[in-house]
Amino acid sequence: MVDFGRLALAVVLAGTVAKVAHRRQSLSTSGAWAAFVSGSALFAFGTVFWYAPLLFFFVSSSALSKLPKPKSVERDFAKGGRRDALQVLANGGEAPLWLWAARAWPGASEALYIGYMARLAAATADTWATEVGVFRRERPRLLGLFGPVEPGTSGGMTPSGTVAGALGALLIGTLAAVQIICSQGMRASALWAAGLVGSAGFLGMMLDSVFGAFWQHRRRCRRCGKIVEALEHCGLPTVYAGGRRWMTNDAVNAMSGLFSALIAAGAAYFWRF
């Protein structure tokens, strides 16, 4: 049966978080609504081990997005610090689906939880890497190995950003280990889960860079000739310059995150720990 008291409390808590984030310009109006719906479901039907990691990702990423960055980055490549509904969905907004799947399939609930945590680990790693790399104002290189690219370019990687991303993924992995310890006691599987989630999250970050470098939609400014992601630059509409037309930055985030989640969930299910 539905616990209407808990449901009401969940709506209040999720609404409060979304409203505060909107006022602090971490979320746009559509992003706040998306976060409200997702958060309400997690608060109402999940435990603290489901919604606390998502809150950690959101709060930490929002804080890092406020770090100063070159104006050209937000103008040419990023949507800005205010995440809209598509960005929320692309970075773990489908979290209630993982929760409901785990409830509907008890035999795979632990594996699905690991997949969910890997999804958040990938989103955390990618966001931390981007925000820290841009803040440090290091010159990024394509996939960290090839020629230098403009800060903010999809597929560009910096040493500090990569380290920050690895740390973010490992922290989410640590939260997964804490869940196992709290529910089952100290077991070797807790360390295994931390490593699996952290590794999958780091893999998701790397896949995000690969997808961004080779397949993400790119545009060219008709006035200055610069390659950008924005639909308008130098006061003129930009034109298509390469990549898959449907492969936006949000699509890249969603695909890389879900891919890493499926790998982690599959590994956890077939190699039981």
Image (cartoon, rainbow, N blue to C red):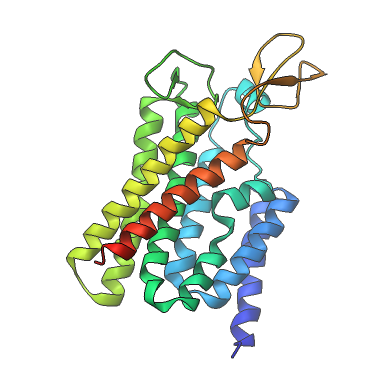
Which residue lies most toward the front here?
Answer: 270
Look at 69% across and 55% down and name the residue there. 32
* Count of numbered labels shown in the rendering: 0
180 left or right of 201 in image: left
Look at 45% across and 33% down and name the residue there. 132
Query: Residue 12 occupies which quadrant of the picture?
Result: bottom right
Q: Nearer the viewer, residue 11 or 68?
A: 11
Q: Nearer the viewer, residue 18 or 127?
A: 127
7 left or right of 200 in image: right
- Which quarter of the figure is the N terminus placed in? bottom right
**At which x and y percent is residue 73?**
60, 24
Image height of 153 relative to 270, above or below: above
Query: Residue 222 occupies which quadrant of the picture?
Result: top right
Q: Nearer the viewer, residue 264 or 85?
A: 264
Which residue lies most toward the bottom here?
Answer: 1
Which residue lies most toward the top here?
Answer: 224
The reply to whether residue 60 is in sight is no
145 left or right of 35 in image: left
**At which x and y percent is residue 43?**
55, 72
**At which x and y percent is residue 13?**
61, 70
Look at 36% across and 59% down and name the residue there. 266
The reply to whether residue 241 is in sight is yes
- Which quarter of the figure is the C terminus placed in? bottom left
Image height of 60 relative to 242, above or below: below
Look at 62% across and 31% down and name the residue there. 78
Q: Nearer the viewer, residue 96 or 69?
A: 96
**At which x and y percent is residue 107?**
38, 76
Which residue lies most toward the right here?
Answer: 236
